């Protein structure tokens, strides 16, 4: 089984565990989610999914995303100034830079930042369980 197949299997299992039918429309949406290299919003996911399965509706996209989010296999991001955007949760932990001019979302990982966050939490008597970091930036001119 390839990584792509494994990702679809996890997403499909999450839907079945939620008690919903895995329809052609939902399989098409899962394929779009699996292949997304960016962080699309529901409207963009609908647009991409309609290229595969024209019968899909926005209601199906939203309901499916909610089920996948509740199952922990999709992350919802609410970046400032925009609608909720989505990505599969199968990636290694990473943080985000949001380009304020273009809306582009860039993923990054920094061992220095992770270490500093853990040190600060420890100094204050805490252990980091989970975190999200979003940097809102403009490209240098």
Image (cartoon, grey):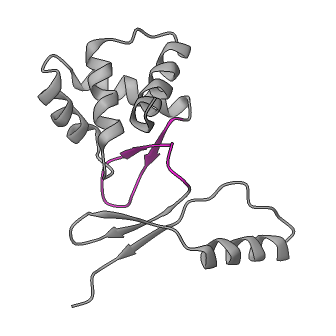
The residue sitting at 22% across, 72% down in the picture is: 101
Left or right of 99, for residue 66: right
Q: How many numbered marks does the figure carry?
A: 0
Residue 59 image offset from top left, x and y in percent? 28, 22
Report the front residue among 33 and 75: 33
Establish if 103 lies above or below 32: below
The residue sitting at 50% across, 13% down in the picture is: 16
Residue 34 image offset from top left, x and y in percent? 35, 37
The residue sitting at 46% across, 27% down in the picture is: 11
Establish if 4 lies above or below 109: above
Where is residue 30, by image quadrant? top left
Establish if 22 lies above or below 78: above
Would you say residue 84 sits in the magenta stretch? yes
Q: For the view shown, which residue lies furthest in the bottom direction? A: 141
Report the front residue among 13 and 139: 13
Left or right of 132, for residue 42: left
Establish if 11 lies above or below 89: above
Residue 68 image offset from top left, x and y in percent? 47, 29
Report the front residue among 100 and 14: 14
Report the front residue among 94 and 44: 94
Residue 114 image offset from top left, x and y in percent? 64, 71
Q: Quadrant of the C terminus?
A: bottom left
Would you say residue 90 sits in the magenta stretch? yes
Magenta stretch in the rendered image: 73-92
The residue sitting at 53% across, 16% down in the picture is: 18
Q: For the view shown, which residue lies furthest in the right direction? A: 125
Q: Report the magenta stretch's main SS.
A: loop
């Amino acid at each position: 089984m390839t990584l792509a197949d494994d990702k679809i299997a996890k997403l499909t299992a999450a839907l079945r565990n939620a008690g919903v039918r895995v329809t052609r429309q939902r399989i098409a949406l899962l394929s779009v989610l699996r292949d997304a290299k960016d962080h699309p919003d529901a409207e963009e996911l609908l647009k991409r999914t309609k290229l595969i399965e024209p019968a899909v509706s926005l209601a199906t996209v939203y309901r499916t995303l909610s089920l996948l989010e509740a199952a922990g296999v999709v992350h919802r991001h609410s970046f400032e100034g925009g609608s909720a955007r989505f990505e599969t949760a199968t990636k290694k932990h990473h943080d985000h830079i949001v380009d304020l001019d273009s809306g582009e979302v860039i993923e990054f990982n920094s061992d220095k930042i992770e270490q500093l966050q853990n040190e600060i939490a420890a100094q204050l008597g805490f252990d980091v369980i989970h975190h999200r970091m979003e940097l809102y930036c403009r490209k240098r001119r």
